[in-house]
């Protein structure tokens, strides 16, 4: 079989699988999703020789790339397909795009299959044009039009929309699946809406809700973030972008629609305006990862919340924090010490039985977490 024939067969299987899995929600957006996926699969066939995926493996590898307090989280499926959530900042000589490309190459990738842009703030979408200029991005996933207006947003959206036109584009709704081969990626928040139907394993009352104290509702782009729960077998990781304290509550109270997760990427980079005990303790993650910067996000309260958790959990920080109270986790759990710009990552490798390990790119040391509760 020629490579284009085998690619066409894979594309057909890919499209059929997606049709089976497709969430039946907003018909227009759903139809757009299907059309874009089909177009992407065909485009991949046309360019097949240059667009080979990474080697298949038996682990889901997740790189928490240091973008100095933004987000750039790279998921590499056991199938070799990839999903990048956000691309850090623009500028700084292309620093964040260069770091993403460097990690992607280490992971054996020659392209990004899905780029999920959680929302249109500079620490998440700013680096997309520079990344798109360095590496092919097949499908851009976002929540739809920007919720904010004005010069600041226009300066971000113009270059983003131009970069986005280089690939397929899909807008996702709550309940949609992002069809990364080998993973189950569910959208649990998008465009201001939150998941209402429990995921498998969710739906039980959450007794921790009684002690929850609400904060002011968030009205910026943060509140429109695309949030995902990604599963590989029994392993699950949650990533809510920059959703708010009250929206986290809305996902797990009065019933916990998520269930438990293995790993939580701390919302809003681990800032004090996210991470209530009602939310974190209900999810029972074994590890929480904060994509903070040395002076981006006040992580002290999260350090305390994780330290007092009723189930054992570790907090990993991308940076030692110098913002707010001087409270950080122990140094082996911090990727970047001091205020230097070293760009060390954290790498997670997960197995289908739910076990996983986290490696600190600064020290090379790895901590393993067993499967089960
Ligand atoms: Zn942010």
Image (tube, rainbow, N blue to C red):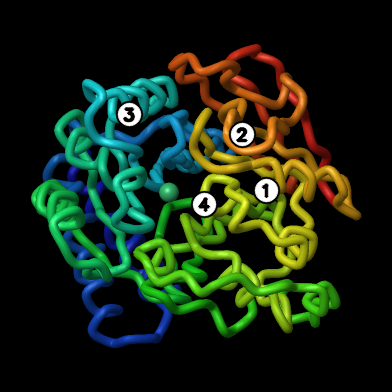
Report the Cα–Cα distance between label 2 and label 1.
Answer: 10 Å
> CB of mark 2 within 8 Å of CB of mark 1?
yes
Q: What residue sits right under mark 3 in the picture?
A: 96
Residue 342's place in the image compared with 246, above or below, is above
Q: Nearer the viewer, mark 3 or mark 1?
A: 3
Callout 4: SS: helix
- Residue 50 in the image: state x and y as whole percent: 18, 31
- Tell me, for residue 268, which label it has, or none: 4
Residue 35: quadrant of the picture: bottom left
Q: Nearer the viewer, mark 2 or mark 3?
A: 3
The one of 217 and 255 positioned closer to us in this rendering: 217
Mark 4 and mark 1 lie on one chain; the one further toward the N terminus is 1
- Residue 124 in the image: state x and y as whole percent: 35, 46
> CB of mark 3 within 8 Å of CB of mark 1?
no
Q: Which residue appears at 31% of the width and 40% of the height?
A: 112
Q: Nearer the viewer, mark 4 or mark 1?
A: 4
Report the Cα–Cα distance between label 4 and label 1.
Answer: 15 Å
Report the Cα–Cα distance between label 4 and label 2.
Answer: 20 Å
Q: What residue sits right under mark 1 in the picture?
A: 263
């Amino acid at each position: 079989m020629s490579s284009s024939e085998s690619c066409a067969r894979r594309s057909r299987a890919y499209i059929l699988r997606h049709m089976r899995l497709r969430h039946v929600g907003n018909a227009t957006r759903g139809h757009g999703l299907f059309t874009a996926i089909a177009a992407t699969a065909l485009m991949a066939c046309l360019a097949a020789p240059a667009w080979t995926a990474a080697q298949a493996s038996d682990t889901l590898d997740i790189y928490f790339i240091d973008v100095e307090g933004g987000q750039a989280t790279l998921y590499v499926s056991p199938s070799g397909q990839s999903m990048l959530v956000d691309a850090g900042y623009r500028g700084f000589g292309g620093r964040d795009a260069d770091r993403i490309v460097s990690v992607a190459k280490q992971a054996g990738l020659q392209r990004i299959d899905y780029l999920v842009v959680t929302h249109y703030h500079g620490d998440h979408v700013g680096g997309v044009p520079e990344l798109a200029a360095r590496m092919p991005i097949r499908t851009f996933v976002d929540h739809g039009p920007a919720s904010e207006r004005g010069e600041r947003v226009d300066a971000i959206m113009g270059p983003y929309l131009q970069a986005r036109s280089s690939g397929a584009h899909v807008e996702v709704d709550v309940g949609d699946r992002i069809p990364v081969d080998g993973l189950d990626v569910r959208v649990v928040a998008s465009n201001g809406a939150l998941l209402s139907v429990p995921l498998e394993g969710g739906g039980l009352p959450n007794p921790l809700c009684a002690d929850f104290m609400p904060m002011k509702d968030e009205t910026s782009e943060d509140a429109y973030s695309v949030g995902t729960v990604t599963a590989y077998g029994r392993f699950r990781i949650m990533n809510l972008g920059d959703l708010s304290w009250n929206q986290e509550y809305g996902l797990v109270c009065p019933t916990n629609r998520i269930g438990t997760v293995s790993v939580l990427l701390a919302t809003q980079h681990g800032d004090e305006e996210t991470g209530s005990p009602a939310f974190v303790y209900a999810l029972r993650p074994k590890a929480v990862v904060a994509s903070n910067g040395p002076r981006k996000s006040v992580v002290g309260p999260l350090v305390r919340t994780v330290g007092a958790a009723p189930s054992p959990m570790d907090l990993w920080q991308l940076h030692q924090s110098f913002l707010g109270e001087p409270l950080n986790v122990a140094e082996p759990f911090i990727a970047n010490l001091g205020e230097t710009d070293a760009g060390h990552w954290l790498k997670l490798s997960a197995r289908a039985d739910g076990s996983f390990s986290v490696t600190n790119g600064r020290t090379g040391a790895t901590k393993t977490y067993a499967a089960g509760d």
